[in-house]
Image (cartoon, helix red, strand yellow):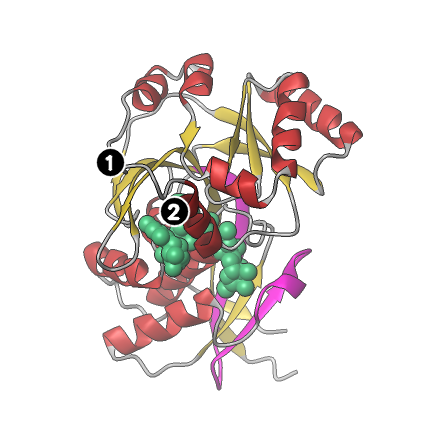
Amino acid sequence: MTGRRTPAIEVRVPAKVNLELRVGPVRDDGFHALSTVYHAVDIVDDVTVRRADDWGIEVTGPYADRVPADDTNLAYRAARLLASDRGVDDPVHIEIAKTIPVAGGMAGGSADAAATLVGCDALWGLDTPRPDLERLAARLGSDVPFLLTGGTALGSGRGEQVVPVLTQGTFHWVFALHHGGLSTKDVYAELDRLRADEPVADPEPGQDVMAALRAGDVEQLASALHNDLEDAACSLEPHLRTTMATGLEQGALAAIVSGSGPTVAFLARDNTAALDLMVGLSAEAVADEVVHGRGPVGGAHVTSDPGLRSTR
Ligand SMILES: C[C@](O)(CO)[C@H](O)COP(=O)(O)OP(=O)(O)OC[C@H]1O[C@@H](n2ccc(N)nc2=O)[C@H](O)[C@@H]1O
Ligand SMILES: Nc1ncnc2c1ncn2[C@@H]1O[C@H](COP(=O)(O)OP(=O)(O)OP(=O)(O)O)[C@@H](O)[C@H]1O
């Protein structure tokens, strides 16, 4: 131990669920045109960046063994991208304390990338203009800009263009996790296969989700939830249908596949109903793990002062 004090920044970042996900045609760049309503929930990763002699990354928490701790990690790529874009030569060590499910359709990797952009920006004292940070975020992945913003937001383009939307109140969710994971790319490809013979319209945001959010009406929201990737995720993992049906039998107001799955999100009437649902789902053993989440919550934000922190 040297006792040397090393500046470090800790950033907390949420997971997301898509309240509405409408997938349009494949664009010239290979991505699908999207219209989506993102919603950030309080299942979080904590990402700490600190100055180091060399670039490095470490992942801790229950899912650490499923996340690459090397230069393919999206958080590592985020740090290197910001450094090269801003002309910084100041290596960092990144530590991710992970509780967001991996390959679960909750944007865990994207969340870590957004947190790392925010953390490195603060550590290096860059004060990067927000539009520039959002542009870098979009280069890392379609979901990354939303994790900078958080809350509830309308996403368009390939999902990277994000505008906050007005909401009232807090919504209670129960997430049924399936540890097998699904590849986002495979789920989009399965959707294309399933609707190969149908005309695919440009995606338009529906009004029902927005109206429910404005009113803070949980029942209205329950009947408005929609995910075009749901059939594709269930086609690849048919047991998700059983999980969804079980949650509805146990009192959930609605069930939806989260993003590209295989996490299933259940909307509960309130906190008590969410806890009851967790007990019911656990007893039926239809998922590997059952987690409570509340939304909306803010996007990636610094939780420790950008001051000095002991390495000991
Ligand atoms: C399913 C969602 O999570 C919904 O928010 C996102 O659309 C996925 O966002 P993401 O994980 O950040 O995805 P990216 O890293 O940008 O892309 C991963 C892969 O997903 C597919 N992809 C993603 C976004 C999009 N609009 N069209 C696509 O077809 C592509 O095959 C792409 O190679
Ligand atoms: N920081 C990271 N956290 C999690 N996975 C990462 C990370 N960096 C790279 N990966 C890789 O990316 C894959 C997808 O992980 P992620 O948890 O982001 O999926 P996801 O939540 O389904 O994504 P999305 O909802 O954005 O489509 C993982 O299987 C893992 O190999």
Q: Is residue 41 magenta?
A: yes
- 290 over 71 or under it: above or below: above
Which x, y percent locates residue 70? 53, 76
Three-letter code for the amino acid on which mark 2 is drawn: Asp
Q: Which residue is the extreme one toward the right? A: 283
> Measuring 63% from the left and 62% from the top, which residue is drawn there?
66
Mark 2: give few (<14), some (14-19) or many (20+) Cα within 10 Å.
Answer: some
Q: Which residue is the extreme one toward the front? A: 197
> Measuring 22% from the left and 38% from the top, which residue is drawn there?
202
Q: Nearer the viewer, residue 197 or 67?
A: 197
Q: Which residue is mark 1?
A: 201
Which x, y percent locates residue 259? 46, 42
- 160 over 310 or under it: above or below: above
- 198 over 133 or under it: above or below: above
Three-letter code for the amino acid on which mark 1 is drawn: Ala
- 194 over 253 or under it: above or below: below
Q: Which residue is mark 2?
A: 192
